[in-house]
């Protein structure tokens, strides 16, 4: 039960944990915990005095046991890779929240009340997600005051599908976001109060969830949204083996009268595994603080508008560079957070803050005047990768072999060349593109750019339905929609040729990267956006002075090339051969055999 007390005067609360937000009207709303007892606090209705209600928290009243639905549009991959600690680096998904018309009417069409309710929900979510170093940046808040923007139904699956399609066709064109959540007043069929796609964060098509506004207390609804976003971030439902040092955990599939606030051991492991395997790129971006619509909250551990730093509450703060009371830098400090901040000062220009991860990656280095690591940059589109099996494209190295492993598991391989003749048939399991609902057959020169064919691996594909013939297997979409079994744009289909919208074309016609490197001075190379980027070991912005890093490693420039010829690598103190007017795919001889010939005399270091 809930015990209600009216509070007047000033209250000093020494808490073990809390989750407050202050409204623009100077009211408090949230929860706190002290001596093992939890309390909820909120303003006393339409009062012009600073009066609040404090609820001694036992259990929130629920009409019945509720559950979470889940759409698993992926499957778990077999992996023997060790789970690493990825919680040291923060992630900030940019989230847009929509409130349908029914809860707007439920709260008497009071926009300010609704806004404060959503701010409270996001505040609670950030309190929960702080444990995994995630800050949910609320960059969009839409209240559907004049009617719903998409078709909604008590069938949760239909509503999620409808909302996701609306996000793709409408919202993303107006406001880019990494994830969208819909709060609706609909009472979903059965016991469902929320539904989301699994492992879908950053996806334009599937990064979404829907939440029923099932409780008058915003914290209960916030726990449901935290749960659904957990699915988007790769977390499945907890089993009996999962623990979180609490009575219930966030990812339990049944919502009881107890509001969870901790992730289980299983959730933490699933999240780590998802981040390591899928590496969702949108989470590496740093949100523009001016785009965040939620009011700043000093003490939540994330730097927001008007703050120089935020190290948590005074009890939590261990950062000597930041004053937890004011969220301002301490005297003499130039920074408090970030990959390029060390001992309260900016790291020197050229210090590596994000190392090379793969063939198509470039190392990012500190600028010397910012605490944040620059945005992730990649090799110029068309740069040879995977031992010459592919060309870099937007930070990836798409090959048919790797696409088969993604579709059917790590034991899958590309199907025989004979499979691809099926793409000349123009049927649902063999074509190059669709026009007005019809499957257009591939021309003979384009058959390696249509449907993907694999062999081996798992029986069923990761997405879609299965079709097999002879030793060939492929996938096709369930109930229409985007075909998950098509060969990706940028995949190599011949020397200097790549796939583009179902055609095998000259890479230069797609990438337009010829002569890009000619405009880069010093030790700079062209990146995937045709901008100049310093090579590892050379300091920005001019790239003509050494960053004085003496560790011996393969320089990023030669990583993709050295393994091919087994000629070793350069130490960071050595200088690579000069390339005047370096080009991408149109200069394959230089990028490939030319480099290997030049490096023949080098010794292993």
Image: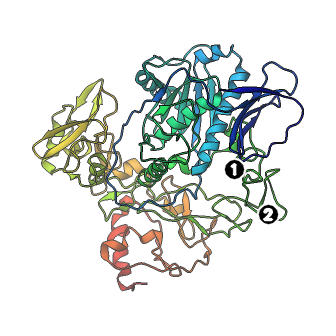
Q: Quadrant of the N terminus?
A: top right
Work out whether 401 lies above or below 288: below
Say whether residue 424 is left or right of residue 380.
Answer: left
Residue 175 visible, this orientation: no
Depth order, front residue of 9/410:
9
Residue at the limit of the structure toward the right, as seen here:
9
Crowdedness near tag 2: few (<14), some (14–19) or many (≥20) residues, C-alpha within 10 Å: some
Say whether residue 11 is left or right of residue 154.
Answer: right
Q: Which residue is mark 2?
A: 333
x 68%, y 70%: residue: 348
Which element carries disc 1, helix, strand or loop?
loop
Which element carries disc 2, helix, strand or loop?
loop
Residue 218 placement (x, y as % from top left): 64, 28
Of marks 2 and 1, which one's residue comes earlier in the chain? Answer: 1
Residue 314 placement (x, y as % from top left): 78, 53
Residue 405 visible, this orientation: yes
Say whether residue 489 is left or right of residue 218.
Answer: left
Q: Which residue is mark 1?
A: 301
x 83%, y 31%: residue: 26
């Amino acid at each position: 039960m809930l015990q209600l007390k009216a509070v007047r005067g000033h209250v000093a609360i020494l808490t073990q944990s809390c989750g407050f937000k202050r409204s623009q009207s100077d009211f408090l709303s949230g929860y706190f915990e002290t001596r093992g007892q939890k309390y909820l606090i909120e303003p006393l209705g339409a009062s012009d005095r600073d009066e609040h209600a404090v609820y001694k928290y036992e259990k929130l009243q629920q009409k019945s046991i509720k559950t979470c639905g889940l759409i698993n549009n992926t499957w778990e991959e077999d992996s023997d890779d060790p789970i690493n600690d990825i919680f040291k680096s923060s992630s900030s998904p940019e989230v847009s929240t929509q409130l349908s018309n029914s809860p707007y009417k439920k709260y008497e069409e009071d926009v300010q009340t609704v806004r404060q309710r959503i701010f409270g929900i996001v505040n609670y979510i950030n309190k929960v997600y702080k444990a995994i170093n995630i800050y949910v940046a609320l960059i969009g808040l839409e209240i559907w005051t004049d009617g719903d923007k998409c078709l909604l139904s008590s069938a949760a699956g239909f509503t999620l599908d409808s909302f996701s399609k609306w996000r793709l066709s409408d919202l993303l064109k107006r406001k880019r976001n990494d994830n969208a959540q819909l709060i609706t007043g609909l009472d979903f069929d059965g016991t469902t109060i929320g539904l989301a796609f699994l492992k879908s964060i950053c996806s334009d098509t599937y990064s979404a969830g829907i939440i029923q506004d099932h409780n008058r207390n915003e914290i209960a609804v916030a726990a449901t949204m935290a749960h659904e976003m957990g699915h988007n971030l790769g977390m499945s439902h907890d089993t009996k083996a999962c623990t979180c040092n609490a009575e219930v955990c966030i990812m339990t599939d049944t919502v009881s009268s107890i509001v969870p606030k901790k992730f289980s051991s299983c959730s933490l492991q699933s999240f780590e595994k998802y981040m390591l395997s899928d590496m969702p790129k949108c989470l590496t971006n740093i949100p523009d603080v001016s785009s965040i619509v939620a009011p700043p909250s000093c003490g939540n551990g994330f730097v927001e508008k008007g703050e120089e730093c935020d190290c948590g509450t005074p009890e939590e703060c261990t950062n000597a560079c930041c004053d937890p009371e004011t969220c301002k830098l301490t005297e003499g400090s130039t920074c408090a957070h970030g990959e390029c901040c060390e001992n309260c000062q900016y790291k020197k220009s050229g210090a590596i803050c994000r190392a090379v991860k793969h063939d198509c990656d470039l190392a990012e280095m500190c600028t010397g005047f910012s605490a944040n690591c620059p945005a992730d940059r990649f090799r110029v589109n068309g740069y040879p990768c995977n031992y010459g099996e592919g060309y870099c494209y937007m930070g990836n190295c798409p090959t048919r072999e790797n696409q088969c492993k993604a579709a059917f598991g790590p034991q899958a391989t590309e199907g025989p060349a004979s499979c691809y003749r099926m793409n000349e048939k123009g049927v649902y399991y063999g074509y190059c593109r669709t026009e007005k609902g019809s499957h257009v057959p591939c021309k003979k020169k384009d058959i390696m750019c249509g449907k993907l064919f694999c062999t081996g691996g798992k029986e069923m594909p990761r997405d879609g339905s299965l079709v097999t013939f002879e030793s060939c297997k492929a996938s096709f979409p369930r109930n229409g929609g985007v075909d998950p079994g098509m060969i990706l744009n940028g995949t190599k289909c011949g020397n200097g040729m790549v796939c583009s919208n179902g055609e095998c074309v000259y890479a230069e016609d797609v990438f337009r990267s010829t002569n890009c490197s000619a405009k880069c001075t010093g030790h700079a190379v062209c990146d995937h956006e045709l901008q100049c980027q310093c090579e590892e070991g050379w300091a920005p912005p001019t790239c003509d002075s050494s960053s004085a890093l003496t560790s011996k490693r393969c320089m990023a420039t030669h990583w993709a090339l050295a393994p091919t010829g087994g000629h070793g690598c350069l130490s960071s103190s050595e200088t690579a051969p000069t390339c005047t007017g370096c080009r991408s795919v149109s200069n394959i001889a230089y990028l490939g055999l030319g480099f290997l010939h030049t490096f023949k005399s080098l010794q292993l270091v």
